[in-house]
Image (cartoon, helix red, strand yellow):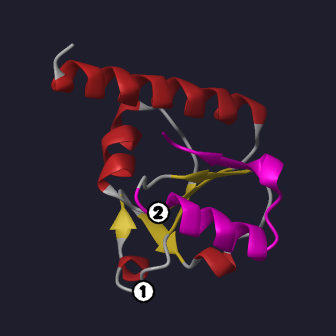
Amino acid sequence: MPFIIQSKQDINAQGLQVSKFSSKYSKLIFWGCSAELFSLLPIMNLQEFTLCDSSQVKQKSYYKGIPISNPSAIQKNGVLIIAPYLYGNEIEKSALEMGWSKEAIYRLR
């Protein structure tokens, strides 16, 4: 299968998984403002979600009017979705150290 078709199918599958979370959890928190996340967000019809990133530069930015917060300032309720592939292990480790439960963390793949 050509790469571009496989990539589109993967993004759509991730979108479906996140949509399931939005019906199950009252709050979706995305950690890691990455190219992967910004490819995924437009295909979903999410009304409300939180964005956070460890980068102080990104914390001064917005996505469609939604501020990007410091992960330590986020309340630990709902589901935490780790967006970037490259730093997923480090983000998950930090989230666990900050008090997130393993069951409340989902990593995009």
Q: State the image quarter where residue 95 is shown.
A: bottom right
| In the image: residue 84, left or right of residue 57 | right
Q: Position of residue 65 (x, y in %)?
A: 39, 62
Which residue is more in the foreground, 31 or 88? 88
Residue 100 belongs to magenta span: yes
The stretch in magenta equals 86-109
- Residue type at mark 1 is Gln
Q: Where is residue 36 in the image (x, y as percent from the top left)?
A: 35, 48
Q: Dot 1 corresponds to which residue?
A: 56
| In the image: residue 3, left or right of residue 57 | left
Q: What element carries label 2?
A: loop
- Which class describes the residues within 10 Å of circle 1: few (<14), some (14-19), or many (20+)? few
Q: State the image quarter where residue 50 is shown.
A: bottom right
- Residue type at mark 2 is Gly
**Mark closer to the chain start, 2 or 1:** 2
Distance, label 2 to label 1, CA atoms, is 12 Å
Residue contact at pointers 2 and 1, CB within 8 angstroms: no
Which residue is more in the foreground, 58 or 2? 2
